[in-house]
């Protein structure tokens, strides 16, 4: 799971460059409703890994992956058929140790519980994650029309609510990049520009189901801003499905 969290961070950067295709594909499938015009998307992700799962010594720890911006998610108390694609804040949480293990997805009702400074030098998540916020999956919109699935569960005695308090502080390591992409199919076309900023972070955190405070083994923040221009309407098959 720790490796999956790291891969998710990288994937969110790589696929945000293909957001034009993602948004267009969602629109074609009836989920996004994006017609011709110009759109601006922003997505900020903060992640932290507190310990490494080890079935031998059962050392407690947890991972958190927070995405604010254009997300695809399915609430557990929703209709079970149509995922939502909207500006939202998704928290993917995994914990492990002698008390059991679990992996949960939440769509925050109070998005102000997650804060990130504009220069990426600091961030915080102070929230009570409740059962009515749970989602069966949740992730940033990627270059695929289908949302990335996330397993949800936990031991019999380990269920929400979870009080989670995490702070990120910059290490001074940062990066930036800009990608441009185009796509065309008949009279339909997209043109997008994606700006990415990254920052290495230190993080400390607590969660009420584990004792004590934890220092992150790895942590970071990624901010993406995408400008998308759409012309025309896609025909069936333009995206290969």
Image: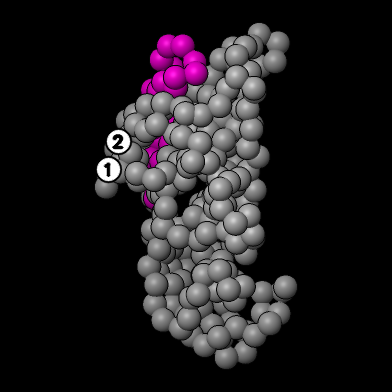
Image side of residue 156 versus residue 218, left or right: right
From this viewpoint, is residue 205 visible?
yes
> Residue 117 shows which numbered tag?
1
Percent across and percent down for residue 24 are 55, 73
Q: What stretch is highlighted in magenta?
A: 199-224
Judging by the rendered image, the residue that carries numbered circle 2 is: 122
Depth order, front residue of 161/111: 161
- Quarter in which the N terminus is drawn: top right
Which residue occupies 49% across, 41% down?
A: 132
Q: Which residue is drawn at 56% across and 26% down?
A: 159
Q: What element carries label 1?
A: loop
Is 83 rendered above or below residue 24? above
Q: Which residue in the rendered view is the most extreme toward the left? A: 118
Relative image position of residue 200 (x, y in whole percent): 40, 35
Q: Which residue is located at x 47 percent, y 63 percent?
A: 179
157 horizontally vs 214: left or right: right
Left or right relative to 121: residue 188: right
From the viewer's side, name the closer residue of 3 and 134: 134
CB atoms of marks 1 and 2 within 8 Å: yes
* Label 2 secondary element: strand
Membership of 215 in magenta stretch: yes
Q: Is residue 74 above or below residue 64?
A: below
Earlier sequence position, callout 1 versus callout 2: 1
Q: Which residue lies furthest to the bottom in this view?
A: 187
The Cα–Cα distance between marks 1 and 2, rounded to whole angstroms, is: 6 Å
Percent x, y for residue 20? 51, 70
Q: Is residue 119 above or below residue 216?
A: below
The quarter holding residue 125 reads top left
- Residue 113 lies in magenta, yes or no? no
Q: In this rendered view, identify the residue nearer to me: 43 or 181.
A: 43
Count of numbered circles on the image: 2
């Amino acid at each position: 799971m720790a490796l999956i969290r790291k891969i998710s961070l990288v994937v969110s950067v790589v696929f945000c460059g293909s957001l034009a295709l993602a948004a267009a594909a969602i629109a074609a499938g009836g989920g996004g409703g994006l017609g011709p015009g110009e759109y601006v998307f922003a997505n900020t992700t903060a992640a932290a890994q507190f310990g490494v799962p080890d079935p031998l010594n059962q050392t407690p720890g947890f991972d958190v992956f927070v995405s604010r911006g254009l997300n695809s998610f399915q609430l557990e108390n929703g209709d079970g058929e149509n995922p939502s694609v909207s500006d939202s804040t998704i928290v993917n949480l995994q914990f492990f140790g002698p008390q059991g293990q679990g992996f949960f997805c939440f769509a925050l009702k109070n998005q102000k519980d997650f804060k990130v400074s504009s220069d990426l030098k600091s961030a915080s998540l102070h929230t009570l994650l409740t059962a009515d916020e749970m989602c069966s999956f949740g992730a940033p919109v990627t270059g695929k029309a289908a949302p990335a699935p996330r397993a949800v569960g936990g031991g019999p005695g380990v269920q929400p609510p979870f009080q989670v308090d995490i702070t990120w502080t910059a290490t001074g390591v940062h990066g930036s990049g800009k990608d441009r992409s185009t796509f065309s199919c008949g009279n339909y076309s997209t043109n997008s520009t994606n700006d990415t900023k990254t920052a290495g972070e230190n993080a400390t955190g607590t969660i009420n189901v584990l004792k004590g405070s934890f220092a992150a083994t790895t942590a970071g923040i990624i901010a993406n801003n995408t400008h998308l221009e759409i012309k025309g309407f896609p025909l069936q098959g333009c995206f290969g499905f």
